[in-house]
């Protein structure tokens, strides 16, 4: 049986692998000239390779093992530093991957935060077990509770009851909580507070004082643990998706790049074919890793969907807030006394919670932040193969850069992104401007036009409480199905949503196989 998979990103490739392993014949259609979606490695100029979009490459450990990605060339690098947080003036803070080492580093200057950090990580690990159980289980069908759904929920319930009263209370209280309130309860250091807040709002239309931002922090933390902790891939994120493509091909998938899906053909309420570059491919099912809006509102005839569904899908919130800046540097920038090890993880540029909230205030009114906060990595610290000897590349998420600008266009504001980003970097790494050999700016508008992220949203939809779990992308269609029989969704716009784990692709295949048995 033939199944067409639309999109060759990490979820599409995971879906293709599991479909092929189940004995089906998946054909992956990827519009761009290479697989990868948001997980690709580009060349800024000859010899300088940099993550084009995502720089937080990750994949679920179980999926990596089942796909045997190590055999297909995946080489995982593990930094010892989680987040380095420089101050505009004064000493920096460091969160190591190892909590005890973080506490040791904090103890001389902030003994209360040192002890609080150990308790914070213990609590996050405890409640994270329940969050992980939710992320790796398919969301229940709200219309008819299948016995398998009840069994999955029972498993989550057992994990919840095993938490104990204090952690169970914490989880229920934290989920709707603004992350600014969450960090205030744990830490005194403005730098620690800012870094944790960044984890709760990055990529979203949320500020630190927005309800539900702590839930995003919990989700991001759980996703990271699912991949074995903070990781980097040798060769950049594109090496990860290339390994996934090799695994999918090895299982029997046919991957076709440089091909465009024109439409999904439907007859009598069911998928019949996919038109690719003007030619029909008969298909028993279609699994789309593309944005739900792009799939349902762009590839289907509106007459194949009800007005109610069209209206609800059109109202899914998916306005992006992040621009991307990539830099080729002649040398490692100087962040005070920081050595290369301290710069091997993420670098948080934003001095306190208020600075992040002020940046968000601009986005609420359609303005590019005058002083954006930055999520930075220098992947060449761990992976010198990306650059010529002594050189480096820097990958920067710029927050906030709203997709919908008021009184301006992204064509006119693109250069301003680079100007404001470099101004912020200069405060923390003086002289970095003189090191820049080449720069690339990708605006939210280009995330949509070039890479297919509707609204420029990197997660295919806002990570808010009303757009997660059984409500992702819509209530009643949170189980990867659509109103069209045989058409399934498996991208970041489905549960568990966002972040790079491959779980959406894997779980969607279970829905496909179940649907084919009916």
Image (cartoon, grey):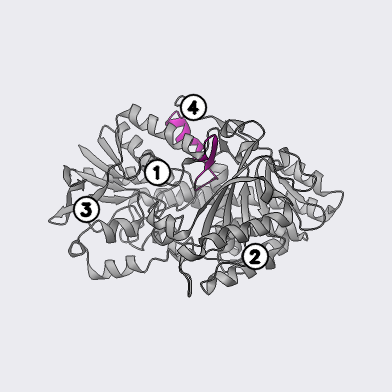
Which numbered marker is on residue 9?
1
Q: Is residue 175 visible?
A: no
Verify whether residue 106 appears in magenta: no
State which mark lies toward you, 1 or 4.
Answer: 1
- Circle 3 crowding by C-alpha within 10 Å: few under 14, some 14–19, many from 20: some
Residue matched to label 4: 70
State which mark lies toward you, 2 or 1.
Answer: 2
The x, y position of residue 388, in whole percent, is 60, 32
Which numbered marker is on residue 371?
2
Residue matched to label 3: 263
Q: Is residue 421 visible?
A: yes
Q: Are marks 1 and 3 in contact (CB under 8 Å)?
A: no
Give me the residue at 72% from left, 64% from top.
184
Q: Are marks 4 and 3 in contact (CB under 8 Å)?
A: no
User: Quick one: label 2 or label 1, which is nearer the N terminus?
Assistant: 1
Q: Are marks 3 and 2 in contact (CB under 8 Å)?
A: no
Foreground residue among 149 and 459: 459
Q: Which residues lie in the magenta part? A: 44-69
Foreground residue among 158 and 348: 348
Mark 1 and mark 4: Cα distance apart in space: 18 Å
User: Quick one: label 1 or label 3, which is nearer the N terminus?
Assistant: 1
């Amino acid at each position: 049986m033939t199944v067409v998979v639309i999109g060759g990103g990490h979820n599409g490739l995971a879906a293709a692998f599991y479909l092929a392993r189940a004995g089906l014949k998946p054909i992956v259609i990827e519009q761009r000239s290479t697989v990868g979606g948001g997980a690709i490695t580009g060349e800024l100029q000859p010899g300088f390779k940099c993550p084009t979009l995502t720089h937080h490459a990750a994949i679920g450990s179980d999926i990596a093992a089942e796909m045997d990605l190590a055999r297909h060339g995946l080489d995982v690098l593990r930094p010892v530093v989680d987040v380095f947080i420089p101050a505009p003036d004064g000493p920096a803070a460091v969160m190591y991957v190892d909590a005890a080492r973080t506490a040791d580093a904090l103890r001389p200057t902030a003994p209360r935060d040192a002890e609080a950090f150990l308790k914070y990580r213990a609590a996050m690990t405890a409640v994270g077990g329940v969050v992980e159980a939710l992320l790796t289980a398919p969301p229940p069908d709200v219309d008819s509770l299948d016995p398998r759904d009840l069994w999955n929920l029972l498993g989550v319930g057992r994990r919840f009851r095993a938490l104990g009263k204090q952690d169970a209370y914490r989880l229920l209280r934290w989920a709707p909580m603004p992350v600014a309130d969450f960090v205030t309860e744990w830490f005194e250091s403005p730098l620690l507070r800012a870094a944790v807040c960044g984890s709760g709002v990055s990529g979203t239309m949320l500020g630190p004082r927005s309800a539900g931002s702590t839930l995003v922090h919990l989700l991001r933390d759980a996703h990271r643990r699912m991949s074995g902790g903070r990781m980097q891939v040798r060769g950049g994120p594109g090496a990860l998706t290339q390994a996934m493509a090799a695994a999918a091909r090895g299982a029997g998938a046919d991957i076709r790049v440089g091909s465009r899906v024109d439409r999904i053909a439907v007859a009598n309420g069911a998928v019949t074919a996919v038109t690719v570059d003007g030619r029909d491919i008969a298909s028993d099912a279609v699994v789309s890793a593309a944005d739900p809006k792009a799939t349902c509102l762009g590839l289907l005839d509106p007459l194949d969907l009800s007005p109610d569904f069209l209206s609800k899908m059109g109202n899914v919130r998916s306005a992006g807030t992040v621009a991307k800046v990539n830099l080729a540097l002649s040398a490692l920038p100087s962040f005070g006394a920081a050595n290369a090890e301290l710069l091997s993880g993420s670098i948080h540029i934003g001095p306190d919670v208020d600075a992040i909230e002020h940046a968000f205030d601009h986005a609420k009114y359609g303005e590019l932040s005058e002083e954006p906060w930055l999520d930075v990595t220098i992947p060449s610290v761990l992976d010198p193969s990306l650059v010529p000897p002594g050189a480096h590349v820097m990958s920067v998420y710029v927050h906030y850069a709203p997709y919908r600008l008021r009184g301006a266009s992204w064509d006119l504001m693109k250069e301003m992104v680079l100007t404001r980003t470099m101004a912020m970097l200069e405060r923390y790494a003086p002289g970095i401007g003189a090191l820049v050999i080449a720069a690339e700016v990708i605006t939210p508008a280009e995330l949509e036009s070039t890479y297919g992220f509707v609204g420029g949203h990197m997660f295919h939809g806002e990570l808010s409480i009303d757009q997660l779990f059984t409500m992702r992308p819509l209530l009643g269609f949170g189980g990867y199905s659509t109103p069209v029989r045989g058409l399934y969704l498996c991208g970041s716009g489905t549960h568990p949503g966002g972040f790079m784990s491959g779980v959406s692709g894997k779980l969607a295949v279970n829905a496909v196989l179940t649907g084919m048995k009916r």
